[in-house]
Image (tube, rainbow, N blue to C red):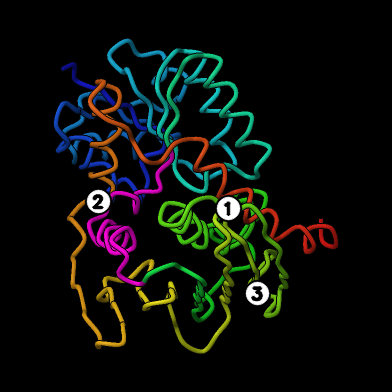
Amino acid sequence: MKTIRWGIIGCGDVTEVKSGPGFQKAENSRLVAVMRRNGALAKDYAERHSVPKWYDNADTLIGDPDVNAIYIATPPDSHKAYTLAAAAAGKPVYVEKPMALNYAECEEMVTVCREAGVPLFVAYYRRRLPRFLKVKSLLNGGAIGQVRLVIAKLYQPPPKKLDADNLPWRLLPEIAGAGLFYDLASHTLDLLDYLLGPIRLAHGFARNQAHLYPAEDIVCGSFVFESGVQGVGSWCFSAFESCDVVDLIGDKGKLTFSTFSEAPVVLATPDGETEFSIDHPPHVQQPLIQSIVDELNGQGTCPSSGESGARANWVMGQMLAGYRSQHG
């Protein structure tokens, strides 16, 4: 099998532990080049992670003949442009989530990559984490019978010490696509897509209640899966405490888990409760990276494609449609 030689565009915080080392530790995979607009920071990253090459220009990295696959780890506002550039160079793309600023951009990325014959993958890495594979196994094994209802809740206190003139990019819709809803709810919605199949109907209400930054800080929505399972979700980012719970309710039991913490997965049935404590691997993206490398070598299929990644953007866009019609 061939070695997939990766180049990273945007070697920021997410690449330090979650993803970067995974490219080096996956089988038949090497990280050979990194890029950051600040060349000094790119050089520092390359030296600390034993990466042979570094650049301060994305086009130069994409054009490097030693690089045969591209990982885009920049904020969402540049995902489409870099994806299209990589596709034009004939190089497979692995792009961070959320996949783009909106569903229309996702559609364009999928179309361009398909026409170029270039695989497109999205960093919804929970699709290959052991704890969520356990949830899927329990569902497929009928542990809770027929799934009837999904209830997803995520709320947390607002970010501390915000500087109105220097806000984090995740709070700026022109860079992130929306607010923290886009950044965090996308993980849960994609995971539900993986566990239960595509969502085909979605509606929602959003507001900026605390007025701490330009984006919405609360979203409540309802959704219906292709299978007929129904769901509700609430995401609030100006609450007094934190909560991260997803309930999958069936006709014979219930599965409860957290999207972001490593709290035990809990199976509840009339016979009682069973807990499954399953830790994350050291580099949480490594299992998904391995599935990408395997697919590129004709040895399997990555479960997170451009098509599946785009569906998360579509659902979030549906939930934000009313808010956006009023606030632009």
94 or 135, which lies in front? 135
Q: In the image, which residues are magenta?
A: 122-144
User: Horizontal placement of 107 versus 23: left or right?
Assistant: right
Question: Residue 209, image x and y in percent?
Answer: 70, 79
Above or below, 69 against 50 in this view is above
Above or below, 297 against 214 in this view is above
Q: Residue at 49% x, 35% y: name it.
A: 306
Local SS, label 1: loop
Image quadrant occupied by the N terminus: top left
Q: Amino acid at mark 1?
A: Glu
Q: Residue at 47% x, 20% y: name it.
A: 86
221 or 269, which lies in front? 269
Outermost residue, top side: 65
Q: Earlier in the sequence, mark 2 or mark 3?
A: 2
Residue under circle 1?
226
Q: Earlier in the sequence, mark 1 or mark 3?
A: 3
Q: Residue 108 colored magenta?
A: no
Residues at marks 2 and 3 touching, judged by CB atoms closer than 8 Å:
no
- Numbered mark located on residue 143 in the image: none
Question: Nearer the viewer's eye, disc 2 or disc 3?
Answer: 2
Residue under circle 2?
17
Question: Residue 56, image x and y in percent?
Answer: 41, 28
Image quadrant occupied by the C terminus: bottom right
Assign the magenta stretch its main secondary structure.
helix
* Quarter assignment of residue 242: bottom left
Q: Amino acid at mark 2?
A: Val
Q: Earlier in the sequence, mark 1 or mark 2?
A: 2
